[in-house]
Amino acid sequence: MTIEEIKTHLNNSEKISFQLPDGTLVPAHFHVTEVGKIKKDFIDCGGTMRHEEVANFQLWQADDYDHRLHPEKLVHIIELSQNKLGIGDLDIEVEYQGETIGKYGLDYNGKTFLLMSKQTDCLAKDNCGVPVAAPMVNLAGDANGSCTPGSGCC
């Protein structure tokens, strides 16, 4: 999800809720303690220079049960960050404290913002000898249980 997409969703929402990948909700008394821009320049294992830039939101919960972040307040925080930090319509990465700081992608289901698990990956598989996964083979055959040439089952 991008900055402009979250602002659109927030402008059409009465409340904000975030759901972790395991289905549990971030407690309603969370705060967004940071909105920033993270730049990462690196070389992948194949020697290719790479550059990434994301908008970063940090969610934090404390024992402050009396305050709830409302959509219009978060839009204000985002717009202030855009103006002060020059954040464009970047993809959003969310940090949230579990046993350690987790980094999540962000999606929306029409009601709740979904924290999506992120995975590491090799960006240079073709350069560093990582084998390409073999295509899945249909061993069940066709509707009659037989395997005909070109059907992908043999």
Image (cartoon, rainbow, N blue to C red):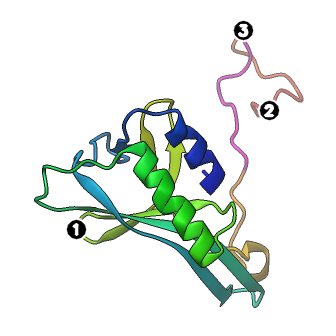
Q: Is residue 118 visible?
A: no
Q: Amino acid at mark 1?
A: Glu
- State the SS at label 1: loop
Q: Residues within 10 Å of mark 2 (few under 14, many from 20)?
A: some
User: Three-letter amino acid code at disc 3?
Assistant: Asn
Using the numbered discs, state the Cα–Cα distance from disc 1 to disc 2 in whole angstroms. Answer: 45 Å
Which is in the foreground here, disc 1 or disc 2? 1
Residue range in magenta is 135-143
From the image, state whether disc 1 or disc 3 is nearer to you: 1
Which disc is residue 144 wearing? 3
The count of marks equals 3
Mark 2 lies on a secondary structure that is loop
User: What is the crowding at mark 3: few (fewer than 14 residues within 10 Å), some, or many (at least 20)?
Assistant: few
Marks 3 & 2, CB-CB < 8 Å contact: no
Disc 1 designates what residue? 99
Residue 138 located within the stretch drawn in magenta: yes
Secondary structure that dominates the magenta span: loop
Whether pointer 1 and pointer 2 mark residues with C-beta atoms closer than 8 Å, the reply is no
Residue occupying the point 27% across, 42% down: 24
Whether residue 137 sits left or right of residue 7 in the image: it is right
Which residue carries the number 2 mark?
152
Q: Nearer the viewer, residue 146 or 115?
A: 115
